[in-house]
Every structure is written in C-alpha cells, then in structure tokens.
Amino acid sequence: MSKHFGGRLSRAADETARAGLAGLVVTPSADLVYLAGYDPPPLYRLTALLIRPGHDPLLVVPELEQPRALASPAAKLVEVTSWRDGDDPYELVRTVLSSSGSGTFGVTDRMLAVHLLGFQGVLPGAKFIAASPLLATLRARKDPSEIHLLGRAARGADEAFRRMVREGLEGRTEQDVARSIGTHLVDAGHESVAFTIVGSGPNGASPHHDPTTREVRMGDPVVLDYGGRVGGYCSDITRTVSVGEPSEEFREVYEIVREAQEAAFRAVAPGVPAQEIDRSARRIIEDAGYGDLFIHRTGHGIGLEEHEPPYMVEGNAEPLEVGMTFSIEPGIYLDGRFGVRIEDIVTVTADGGQRLNNAPRELTVVG
C-alpha cells in the first residue's frame, strides 16, 4: 500500500505547484487517510500534514499521538515531528513554512476552526483557501485497489439485502429491520455500519427517514437504504420492496424509477458530463409526470466518504473519467403515501459503466 500513498503524495505536490499554492495543510480527515494512510481522531490538539512543492512532506503530531503515527503507513513516507502539551504547535508549523509563509495555502475542508485561526494568527501574511477542488481531482479517480475495496463493500451490501429479503419484514418495526440490516452487513464482511434508512409506507416518502417504531404492514412499500465500510471504503445501496402484493400504482411508479435508473446507467461513459447522468434519469421521470417528486440529485461520488465528488447533478459539466465511482439513485416520493428509490454504485470504465451492486433491481415482493 505504501506505493499508493507515495504516488498520491507526489501527485498532490504536483497539483499544489500547478495551482500556484505555497502548500497544503491537511488535518485529520478522509483527505489525510487518502494521502498518507493515517487516520487519527480529529482532536483539538493539532495534527497536520504539510505538503509543499519542492520539499519533503512533514507530519506534525501531538507527542501522545506519535506512536500511532509511527505505526501507520505515513511513517514510511513522510517525516514525523511531534510537539508537547504546553508548546505552541502553530509556531512549529510557522517555522516550517517560514520560507513561504506569505503565500496562499490550501486547507482541508474538515479542518477545525480553532486550527485555521491558529494558522492565521502565526501567518498573518498568508492567505488560506479550500483545498477541496485540488484534492477532489485526485480522489475522484479511483485506482484499482480502491475499486477492489468498493467492490467488496458492494457485494457485502448485496448479500445483506438477500438475507433481509429471506427474513421477511411484516410485523417488524423499522428499528428492528435496521438492526438486522446492520447485523447482516457485518456478517457479510463489513467492518462497520455507517447508516440504515428504513422507510415503510408513508415514511418512505422522506428520503433520509430515521427508522421508527412503526410496524411494517402487509401492502407497505419499504425503502431500504444502507451502507458501511470495508477497508475504509464505503458501500451504499437502496432497494425498495413490497411487503405482500403491491398496488398497481406502486408497480407503475416503481417501473418508472427502474427505467430512470437504467437510463442513467446507460449514459455512463468517459467524457460524458456528470450532469448528463442526472438528465438521463430525470427525463424519464419528468416524461411520466412525476418530475416535481424527484427532489434530489441523481448521484454522488463514493470512496473513503459516503458522499464526495463527483456529483451527478444539473450544473456539473465535469466530464466523467475512467475510475470515477458514484451512486445512481433516482427516486419518486409521494408525500404521505410512499416512496421509491433504487440505488447502485457504478464505476466508469473505458467501455462505459460497470455496476458494483448486483442485487435485483426488479420489484421484489417479501413477506
């Protein structure tokens, strides 16, 4: 894995120079994990990776965190220096950046305000901007090792759905179903569960519904949206099922969403603007008369975070590139009645798109 991180650090330095920045300051976040394989807690004590064109990267850590840092992949790639409680870590950073302390620095989006204020205090001549455009360019294109982990995560999510269907839903509370999904994810190889959405009947019309004590009833549509992590990389899948025989209206709406999801998937190819994926799904739903009930973007990137660039949304003309991996999840939500959403994770290949999820997309009837 060290070779992956070494290449990422080198590319980050190159992109920093190309953007005309004096450096990057990366505090605990998915960006730090991506660049150096180090995942410390986001403490008020400063941890910061400093990347500067023409210099070796430096990781500044609290002394009590030094053993953790030295045991991580980062120790083989960067110099690690520590500071003691009572010292001023921002002054330490200032001495490192003094030769370029009046330039413009990119900082990670997840940096705590106390740290940004600390940097501003010791580097009054410097300007700080969001590093997200630069880092998103690097992180959006997944390498084969990342796609492998995303594929494992997707297969585990598919297996959890299979087991959930076999269990049945009728008479169980949404909360009980959510707990079972979490158990199945872990049993299917996930290291942790990130979220579970179980929206039965009218609750399915709320895309981010929190599971409640409502009991699933015969005839209910149920939206199941859940994900976790494998090797740090995320899964995210949605399937909408019918408990018992579905109504004709639900069948009709479900088929529209399925067609929209398929149309968006068929649109995936290198060079296609991201917004075209959204347009392809939305066109099907609008033509069917439900355009106002599709109330969110069609998809989001996924990797070390559940939601990250690129986003499949109107206004994003960024061309898709091989390795970009994202969700395709159109939905229709009838307030007070039911909702339908179908979601797969898709990666861009030289030939088009490849689904990482393969759970059935046809309407599934469960007991």
Image (tube, rainbow, N blue to C red):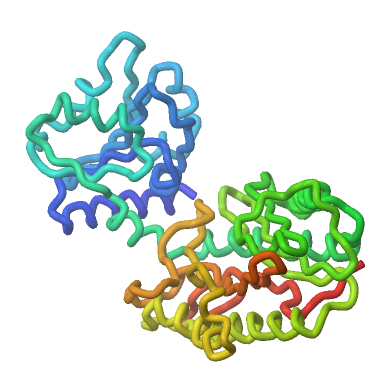
Q: Position of residue 155 (x, y in %)?
A: 70, 64
The number of numbered badges drawn on the structure is 0
Tell me the quarter of the picture where residue 152 sits.
bottom right
Q: Quadrant of residue 294?
A: bottom right
Residue 128: x percent and y percent?
19, 41
Report if residue 187 is visible in the image. no
- Relative height, residue 217 to residue 131 (above, below): below
In the shown orientation, is residue 361 left or right of residue 96?
A: right
The furthest residue to the bottom: 287
Is 333 in front, or is 266?
333
Where residue 117 sits in the image (x, y, percent)? 24, 29
Q: Up-down: is 16 above or below 360?
A: above
Q: Residue at x 26, y 32 (%)?
A: 116
Is 345 located above or below residue 259 in the figure? Answer: above
Residue for point 44% across, 46% down: 30
The residue at the point 31 percent across, 9 percent down is 86
Question: In the image, 159: left or right of 230?
Answer: right
Q: Can I make out residue 170 in this image?
A: yes
Image location (x, y in percent) of residue 293? 56, 74
Q: Which of 192/56 is in front?
A: 192
- Quadrant placement of the C terminus: bottom right
Q: Residue furthest front?
A: 336
Q: Is residue 260 above or below residue 123?
A: below
